[in-house]
Image (cartoon, helix red, strand yellow):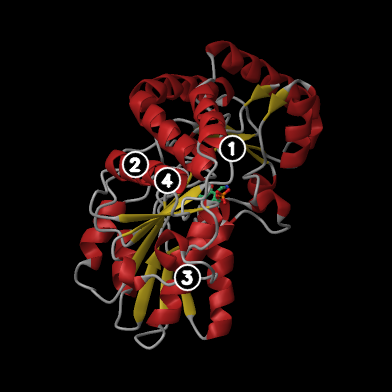
Amino acid sequence: MIYFDNAATTAPYKEALETYMTVSEKYFFNTASIHQSGKDASRLLEAARNQILDLMELKTYDLVFTASATESNNIAIQSMLKRKKQFGRTILTSELEHPSIVNVLEEMKNDGFNVKYIDTNEAGTVNLESLKSMLDSDVVFVTVMALNNIIGSVQPIKEIVKMLKDYPKVHFHVDATQAIGKADLDYNGVDTISISAHKFNGVKGIGGLFIRDLATIRPVLYGGGHEYNIRSGTVNLPGITAMAKALRLTLGEAREVNKRLSQFNMKIRESVEGLEFIRLQPKAAPYIVNMSFVGAKGEVVVNALSKRGIAVSTTSACASKLATLNETLLALDNEDNVIEGSIRISMGRSTTEDDVNKLITALKEVYEELGDVLK
Ligand code: PMP
């Protein structure tokens, strides 16, 4: 199978798997145990934590390890809003967010919060003027992702931090799950930031939440008090050390990988540009190409490619389980048939020119095969 679904998940680095195995064997101890082996494990945990904070250039932040970005997003939103309710009830978010943000916010409406959506520009970025016009004294929480998982648009995080300086009561959360190694963003000034190891060639089941002021975050689940009493549960040390390894490797090769993927991105886009019933979404981060076979269903295209040994997805692995039209593509004012016929091609560090050539051939074959279905 030629893999073009790296935005859904990535293959772990061999080195990350080796770290996972070694730490599982030699440091399987509970980091909360006070015997020497527990202390050794705990030292390893803190070394991994510091390395990740260093690599992310967030040295003044704290980092709480979680099981996923979904969990990190939930902790940030649910815990903040419990605290903020007395100060205001309005939450601002983009129209581009992942279900692990949107569905939590929708749930918050039952708790008396108002959720308002910031307008989107043509390029798939949040409209800063719209955000500015929505900031009033009732706003307590703003959440905007760093890099969109459907089309790859990179959001103006630094500009939002700057804008929110005049609103000290507002907590700014960033879901940076897709951005690691893909966009060189400065997160300093953001209140909380979510990441997930399996999106940057780490192992699954490990995420992180960077926190600017630990005192502002409360647990969502209560227990034995691990991870600064914010995320109880025996710590996944093998996963965490593997995440530190994957992060170092990802950031180390990011420039070279992105340069290569930029060329592949251009090649894929150029190969379909003359086809009447193909619509391309705006060009953004190099690793994603989102295109629609207008008139066809995305699932049909995915299956036709799958039969040819090529793995892509419809919009996103998460959203494609939902019956509704994809929100990111709706925010970009796409017609329903463009959204329905959309596929997401997402490349990774192991994607080769040969993979891309095979994909291009298969895309053309499927286009021909669909014939009159396309319109
Ligand atoms: N946010 C974004 C932007 C994502 O793409 C994903 C993964 N699809 C998540 C959050 C959730 O990540 P996880 O799988 O670690 O829960």
Q: CA distance from mark 4 to mark 1?
A: 37 Å
Q: Nearer the viewer, residue 119 or 141?
A: 141
- Is 37 on the left or on the right of 205, as rendered? left
Counting residues from the start of the chain, the first of labels 4 and 1 encountered is 1
Q: Residues within 10 Å of mark 2 (few under 14, many from 20)?
A: some
How many residues crowd mark 3 within 10 Å: few (<14), some (14–19), many (20+)? Answer: some
| Image coordinates for residue 320, horizontal then vertical, percent | 69, 49
Q: Residue at x 65, y 50 (%)?
A: 318
Mark 1 nearby-residue class (10 Å; few <14, some 14–19, many ≥20)? many
The span from disc 4 to disc 3 (Cα, nearest Å) is: 28 Å
Front of the two marks 3 and 1: 3
Q: Residue at x 53, y 20 (%)?
A: 350
Residues under labels 1 and 2: Cα distance?
Answer: 26 Å
Q: Give the residue displayed 50% in from the left and 38% down from the top.
A: 27
**Residue with the mark numbered 4:** 36
Give percent across and percent down for residue 369.
80, 24
Q: Which of labels 4 and 1 is toward the front?
A: 4
Closer-to-camera residue (191/364): 191
Q: Which residue is mark 1?
A: 9
Task: Please tell me whether mark 4 or mark 3 is closer to you in this view.
Answer: 4
Please name the residue that numbered disc 3 is placed on: 219
Viewport quadrant of the C terminus: top right
Which badge, 1 or 2, comes first in the chain's sequence?
1
Depth check, mark 2 against mark 4: the one in front is: 4
Mark 1 Cβ and ligand 1 under 8 Å apart: yes
Q: The residue tagged with tag 2: helix, strand or loop?
A: helix
The kind of secondary structure element at disc 3 is: loop
